[in-house]
Amino acid sequence: MSEHRIFTAGFGSVYPLYVQKAERKGRTREEVNEIICWLTGYRPEELEKQIGENVDFRTFFAQAPQINPAAGEMKGSICGVRLETIEDPLMRNIRCLDKLIDDLAKGKTMDKILGRKPAVSQKVYEYDAVIHSVPDQDGAYVAFPWDIRQEFGRGRVKVHAAFDGIPYDGSVVNMGVTNEDGTVCYIIGITKGIRKKLKKGAGDTVHVTVRERE
């Protein structure tokens, strides 16, 4: 059985295709390079050397300092094939790289693609907000007037909050609440105990500070 032709293809010739695929979706060459270095263990200058010499894929992966152990746990489909079913180590490495670039082009964050724990933001959000009641429940919340997907890259964020200086550890979430224009309204719940301390309820204004927590 003849080997797959990708094994002898020049990595430097295929590399621009990875970059083009990413850039068409608003991602960057730097992110592509970070993914490749994460998978292979190459330092950036070593990667540039391999690209410049246009070594074939067999050589590129054979000379890789260390294939990331996390790649062995990767799952999913690429080119119609499940990664878990690929037995040939070289082909699996190539398809893992394809899958990582595909995830990048699909808009996944680098933290999610590379399995990293997102860094905790030190930014403090401070604003005044009206307390809203939760219909048919003895609950209440205030809106968080920023898009947390843009701010934090995900749809639920654990936070340290304070309401008029009273501390509370909770989360900013989307509970199906929408703004007047129909966009998603992210909220922070206010417990009954905190409302009692505040001596405030629905319709009252409270000063809110929020920062991310681990």
Image (spheres, grey):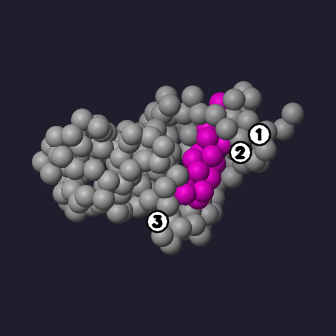
- The location of residue 146, given as percent across then percent down, is 36, 62
- Give the numbered dot on residue 78: 2
Q: Quadrant of residue 45?
A: bottom left
Mark whose residue sits in front, 1 or 3: 3
Q: Residue furthest bottom?
A: 181
Q: Nearer the viewer, residue 197 or 23?
A: 197
Rounded to the nearest angstrom, the CA distance separating label 3 from label 2 is 38 Å
Task: Assess whether mark 3 and mark 1 are in contact (beta carbons under 8 angstroms).
Answer: no
Q: Residue at x 48, y 70 (%)?
A: 180
* Residue 56 in sight here: no
Q: Nearer the viewer, residue 166 or 14?
A: 166
- Asked if residue 108 is among those painted magenta in the image, a careful observer would answer yes
Asked which secondary structure carries label 3, the reply is loop
In the visual, does 14 lie left or right of 68?
right
Q: Quadrant of residue 21?
A: bottom right
Reading the image, the residue beneath label 1 is 81
- The location of residue 195, given as percent across then percent down, is 24, 43
Reading the image, the residue beneath label 3 is 179
